[in-house]
Image (cartoon, rainbow, N blue to C red):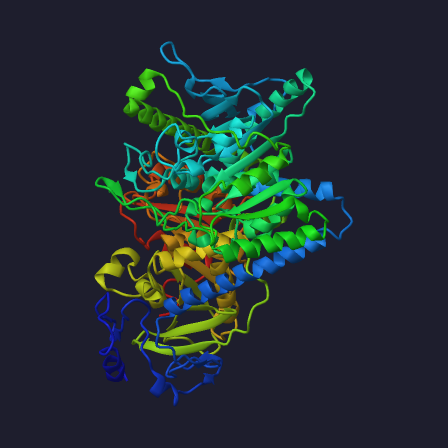
Amino acid sequence: MLQSALDHLAERKPSRLPMQPLGRAMLIRSSISLALVTFASLVAGGERLILAGRIEQTAEVLPGTAPLLIRQPADEIMVQGIRRFCLRELAASRQRRAESWGQERSNGASSMARAEASRERFRALIGAVDPRVTADRTQPCRFEFIASLDRSSIVAWTKQVRVHAVRWPVLEGVTGEGLMLVPERQRAGVVVLPDADWTPEMFCGIRDGLPESVQFVRRLAAAGCLVVIPTLISRSDEFSGSPRVAWTNQPHREFIYRQAFEVGRHVIGYEVQKVLAAVDLLAQHAQRHSESKSSAFPIGVAGVGEGGLLALYAAAIDSRLQSSLICGYFQEREGIWQEPIYRNVWRVLTEFGDAELAGMIAPRRLVIEACGAVEVSGPPVVRNGRRVSAAPGRIVNNRLASVRAEFDRASTMLQTLGKEQALILSVSGPNGDGPAGTDVALRAFAAGLGIDQGLDETLELWQQDASRLSDTKLTLQDATVRQKRQFDELQMHVQSLLRQSPQVRDTKWLKNPNSPEEGKQQRESLRDMVHDELIGRLPRQRLPHNARTRRLFDTDQYSGYEVVLDVVDDVIASGILLLPKNLAAGEKRPLVVCQHGLEGTALDTISRDPQAFGYYKAFSEELVKRGFLVYAPQNPYRGGDRFREIQRMSNPLQRSLFSFIIAQHEQTLDWLATLPVVDANRIAFYGLSYGGKTAMRVPPLVDRYCLSICSGDFTDWVRTIATNEERCGYIFTSEYEVPEWNMAHVASYAELAMLMAPRPFMVEAGHRDGGQPTDWVAGEFGKVRRHYDQLKIGDRTEIEFFDGPHTIHGQKTFHFLHQHLNWRANQSN
């Protein structure tokens, strides 16, 4: 049999790890995944026997299971299947949103109340939740012209319009900066947002870079619009990193996104807040204007590319914006996972596609312009001295068919409200890829503001003082310094929220339970909060297990079987089950689930190959030799961007990679509990690295696990993810899928460990593990120990530090398993 397997594998690609003896057996390693020895010709005659309540291990398949015949590595099948599930769910979300829209509007609630509730939910999703300084009418604020002793705030002018460098307050410690175009006669106020690759000076033609046809802000100003052009966080990587740690190739927008996402904020939300703060000040100006003049002073918003996204979002939130112009952004959004990660918004497609946002804007004027915008092929090319860490993602010009499809969806929704006339589609060029700001689009937008004159004015050339004209380099430097100020302000705001986040969590978690029973009651609601707000759920309905197995290897002490189970459509669970040879008839034993880490396989936890053994110390094999039953699951975090895209596909639907992992483990434990040798009340979890991440996210939410051990991952987790100045920070790595929405205000590792109580929980940490500073680990574990002590069960939690690196240590953790699974070390002998 072994020779037949070797002959089969000889035709395949060389393995990443060589074959290594394991006891008296030989483990066969496939090129990129599990030891998938195809025993198809042997399984056909394999026995399926249950003898006196025990599994007969001479069978090539486990009793009660079907033969496993796959030839492709199971981890590849798993990731491919999850991706298919995600794509199908994304496509289905469009119809679900339409049905939800219809149901909301038939439930009898007033349209105003529904709209306001929708705005508040959307505001929370993009992290635009902090109180704006400008919204406090008791503390009047104004736009500030930026000038110095030797320099005026005026950067350019014509006979009709003056352009000022301007700043305005937004949040505590956060300002907006850019340009303000001030016409002699002011008829309306407009916030106009450039693409993230454009400076305000480029957008209004003061600096080269854009054709005159795109500089429509000049026409608006000439027609009497007081125009504010904010500076957006750019796609450059110039400031993305730290001189104390490393510089990266992440666009500025991604570098802010990764920090902010963890604390429930977003680069999108921050910039929407800057728009709304400008609207606050324009509204105050409008009030003063209306008091001195009889005419109204309407306010609008417009944007191109990334600015179009922000304009759409701002208009959906703020009903004061009477007219909106969205250039080069509006389309079907189910492919959002392919766009840059800084456009990723948790849960957004469960309720808000572009059409639904258009519905929130109605009956106000919304002009959609199908046009060309800035295309982005990916993150910045890596330069010398910078780390490769940016997430992939592209921006391409919207397909006209996609724009029309989403526009038609929006029109259909608005027809039910009798408001479809508020929505206008303008197409630039024959295929919707012409320049932004066409005459048709601009006039429709201006009409929404009540402006029907002045757009035909001949544009005058800008005049500038001699110092600005003669020193172009200085002007470019001004824009760079302004970008850094805006970038640094957002980082400081995020880091402040990060430092304050433990206090926010304490208000939810420190309930001081007086007993395990009281703690259990509190735990249920907290567990639901974590599952729903942090991780997300798959449909509760599961497929039958449909277990398929095959024996992978046989030693004098144990046998190993590969297992594949169905979970939901297209999603499987898989792993390797190790069974000791000395099982007695009718005996049930405790089982330990041993979880591999990032880019690993189930076999890595068994193998004595030096590469795998260096991390895992063959802890699955060591435990089965101690008499435990062992199951080593294959988790889907394998395949680089292929698995990371699962996170990207899932987040807009309020799911994450761990939504799938939890479902896989639930299905696996249900099946394991059916085996006659498994004591279903004694199933423990032990994982290293990403397996340690699993230890913190799966057992706390899955009651079948009676115990959990986290190795090589437990720390002050939210700080590790969001810090911008520590060497252990994930922001400097390529693991862009790791940030979890608002985790800092939901639950960090201490709180997740609290969900284990009253079940035993242990941490294993090496002093030389670069991702786990010892003081961070100790501080976080102290909160866990306090919780267990308050429940009078302090003996159920433990930590072991050892003088070693990122690896399984297997000393006190093994003792912990024996103690709490009630299994003596020599019991199986």
Instruction: List x then y, in percent, for residue 811.
Output: 33, 53
Residue 284, quarter of picture: top right
Residue 411 appearing in the image: yes
Q: Where, by quadrant of the figure, is residue 177 drawn?
A: top left
Q: Nearer the viewer, residue 663 or 827?
A: 663
Residue sitting at 63 percent across and 29 percent down? 298
| Left or right relative to 288: residue 335 | left
* Image quarter of the N terminus: bottom left
> Where is residue 230 shown, x and y percent of the image?
47, 30
**x then y, percent, for residue 797:** 46, 47
- The residue furthest right is 108
Residue placed furthest toward the top: 149
Q: Is residue 50 above or below residue 80?
A: below
**Residue pictured at 56% horizontal, 68% vertical:** 542
Residue 263 visible from this viewpoint: no
- The residue nearer to you, when weighing 369 against 334, is 369
Residue 295 located left or right of residue 745: right
Instruction: From the viewer's perspective, tell me whether residue 190 is left or right of residue 585.
Output: right
Instruction: State whether residue 698 is above or below residue 294.
Output: below
Badge count: 0
Q: Tell me which residue sits at (31%, 77%) in the image.
A: 37
Q: Nearer the viewer, residue 19 or 760?
A: 19
Question: x and y percent of residue 202 in the render?
Answer: 39, 32
Q: Can you say which quadrant of the picture contains the C terminus?
A: bottom left
